[in-house]
Amino acid sequence: MTSTSVLDDLRKSQILELLEQGKRVDGRALDEVREIRIETNAIPKANGSARVFLGDTEVVCGVKIQPDRPFPDTGDKGLFICTAELLPLSHPTVETGPPQPHVIELARVVDRGIRESHMVDVSQLVIEKDKSVIGVFADNVVVDYDGNLFDACSYASVAALLTSKTPKWNWVDDSPTLVEGEDTPLPITTIPVSVTMGKIGNHIIVDPNGDEWESMDARITITTDGDGNICALQKGGFDGFTQEEINQCGEISVRVGAKIREKLKQAQTAGQ
């Protein structure tokens, strides 16, 4: 057994011991999220942007909006794509190079939560049907990592989209032509909120920090829309959840998500 695995086992034992007492390593309640700070308009040249601090995890999201080709089977809808990148300075284990599987999963989970909530009405982002549509690209960059990138990137993406302005293009001479000075807010229909929960032993905790993240047996991310409907779910880790635990996580995601949604609404108002 390596010294690293010994330290990991000791850390997990300490976390489990505290959980048995209803406590966490940072003093939070089991269903309590770390402090969330949201700053909008963080990138002046972007169409929309936000910086989110979830405890000591920091993410910056920039939104780029531009004409694009539609997908062959959805010529009457615009595009929405979310990406994620971890900077080497964000954590000692992060290296440069092609995206690792966990980073690809991160982008997909954030993308799916926003897409399946139908947050952006992409049917209104069409310049010329089957020929040209508006593409919306939310690019997340992790500046500092201390656990739970799923929620941090999701909140940054949502806040950036809520404050984004899309230019207008007309179809002229078989190509999209920019109309100057007619930027409008994106067609937003709801505010999705993801809530990630970790399972350590038989305990469910909300928003795991870095140490808790490394000690989890399983995790689940549940995204709800503004009406409290579950619209996306992603499970990870080597262990499973009982039906009772799944129900518990669903209830937590709705309750906790409603509080976070109010913070996103406040950030939207401040950024307009």
Image (cartoon, grey):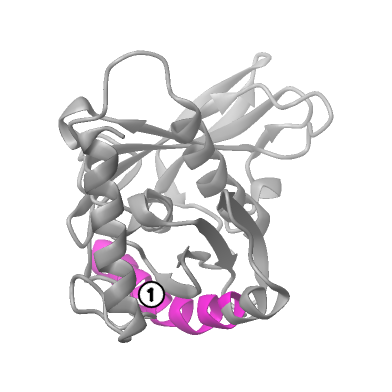
107 lies left or right of 145? right
- Please say if 268 is above or below 180: below
Q: Is residue 154 visible?
A: yes
Quarter of the image containing the N terminus? top left
Determine the main secondary structure of the stretch shown in magenta.
helix
Disc 1 target residue: 260
Q: Considering the numbered disc 1 on the image, is that residue within a helix, a strand or a loop?
A: helix
What residue is shown at x 67% (from left), y 64% (from top)? Answer: 231
- Between 146 and 262, the residue placed more toward the observer is 146
What residue is shown at x 57% (from left), y 64% (from top)? Answer: 222
* Residue 210 x, y percent position in the rendering: 26, 53
Q: Is residue 202 magenta?
A: no
- The residue furthest right is 73
Magenta highlight range: 249-272
- Please say if 34 is above or below 80: below
Tell me which corner region of the image, top left, top right, bottom left or bottom right, holds residue 242: bottom right
